[in-house]
Amino acid sequence: MSAADSQWPAWLRRHTGVELLGPPRLFFAWLTIALSLLMIVYVGAWNAAKYPIVLGYDAQPNAAYAHFLLDKHRLPTPDESGESNQPPAYYFFAGVASRAGHEIFGWLEARPFTAQLPEASYRGAQILNVVLVFLTALCVLWLARGVAPDRPWVWAASVGFFAFLPVVSKVEAMFHPENLNMLCSAAAIASLTHMFVRRRFRLRLMILFGLAVGIGLATRLSMIFVITALIVGSGIAITDPRIRRLFPWKRVAVVAAAVVLLATPWVAYRAIVQHSGPFNQTSELIRAALNPRQHLLADKVTSHAQFFDLSPKVFTEPWRSNFKNQAASETYVEIWGDWLGAFAWSGYSPAPSPAAQRILKDQSYIGVLPTALAILGWFVLLWLAFTRRPELGPVAVLPIFAVGGYLFRSYVALSHDGDLLKAAYALNSAPVWALGFGVATAWLATRSRLARYGMVALFVIFAVLELRFTMYGIRDQVPIF
């Protein structure tokens, strides 16, 4: 650390004793992190109080699943919930939180906890989501400190990016299992990266890793993509002789066995009760990919040509049904805006209101620079993993499998309305994109003081503008500002 970095200006030190706060860059990094965590809680609490949960992705099937699980003490059939092929972990935790929330907030609307979605009955699940996202942000911080222990800028920028990423705030407001899935992915990748970087495989971290993977498998089947990335990334990491020499093969075998045991009840249920394999949908997707002319779903479209197209309407008309089934365009808008009409406007309307249109267009422009920096930073991580730092293998390859699996499923099972291209399905990669943003901006910040101050000013403006969108209100014609 240079003298310039380790000391406060003389005029400030003379009368304040500000040295007690530590080096300036460390102090401002922790201040930024604290403000980012505060914004996660504030925006999450606002949306928990304001957002009608019935508007969320697959709201009715998700609520029905929790209702059958808690009230009828069984898993739903496909006729009772469209999400019946998913594992039950989130629905159990969110259902219990909803019950507790109903006891506290039930006076707002005197209705029981049912599958009919009275908002007051599910307020507790929305508050649980705030906790899950907050814990994920702490995992992002843990991951950033492990990858760049002497770069406070990386820590602060990574957490800040995650805190203000619109798709995170949107899904946080909904009754949706991707919130828990994202936390499990973040905890697994952060704990594994910590062990590889420190080259210490402590039992408590192995247990945390196993729990994260096991609960993730009990939450969403897409955890398979994360597990694949962790296995491939670990293979890259152990090419380092120092890691290979210390790698605890016996403990890994025990953790793997424990994860299999955790997954066994779900596999047994699918086989015995539903007469189906645990990953039957995945195998159907693979068969359909090998036989593209065969229809997989009843509403499957016949042409995939538009999947790879890009549309300028991303910036001029970023809402449904423009650029339908164009993967990059639709996913980008769902990350930064609201293509599906589940948050800022009604998907049943021909177009958003004029006020919502202005904000959605702004969101598309705001997202360009952060997205480019996140991708650039991820490429840096990928390059480091294959050249200098193999211990970064798991974190570097995670987006390949998480986003690749999301795009593969969307391509093979392309639907007529484009609703499979929800960026929420790739939320398990959000912690890595946040880290990539932190890495890229930290590199730029070292180029010159002007670049550093310019980025700080620009991203503060972007963060303030994000609040117009992430705090629910546009759809109800009451924009925040």
Image (spheres, grey):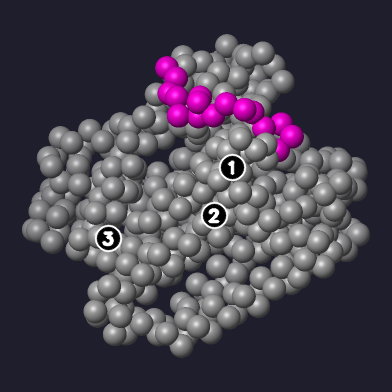
User: Magenta stretch: dominant SS?
Assistant: loop
Precedes in sequence: disc 2 or disc 1: 2
Q: Residue at x 51, y 57 (%)?
A: 225
Residue assigned mark 3: 385
Residue 301 location (% of width, % of height): 64, 28
Task: Give left or right: position of 217 versus 146.
Answer: right
Comparing labels 2 and 1, the label whose residue is closer to the camera: 1
| SS at badge 2 | helix
Residue type for callout 2: Met
Front-lying residue, 326 or 75: 326
Residue type for callout 3: Ala
Front-lying residue, 210 or 5: 210
Precedes in sequence: disc 3 or disc 1: 1
Calculate the distance from the C-alpha at mark 2 to the C-alpha at mark 3: 23 Å
**Which label number is shown at residue 291?**
1
**Which label number is shown at residue 182?**
2
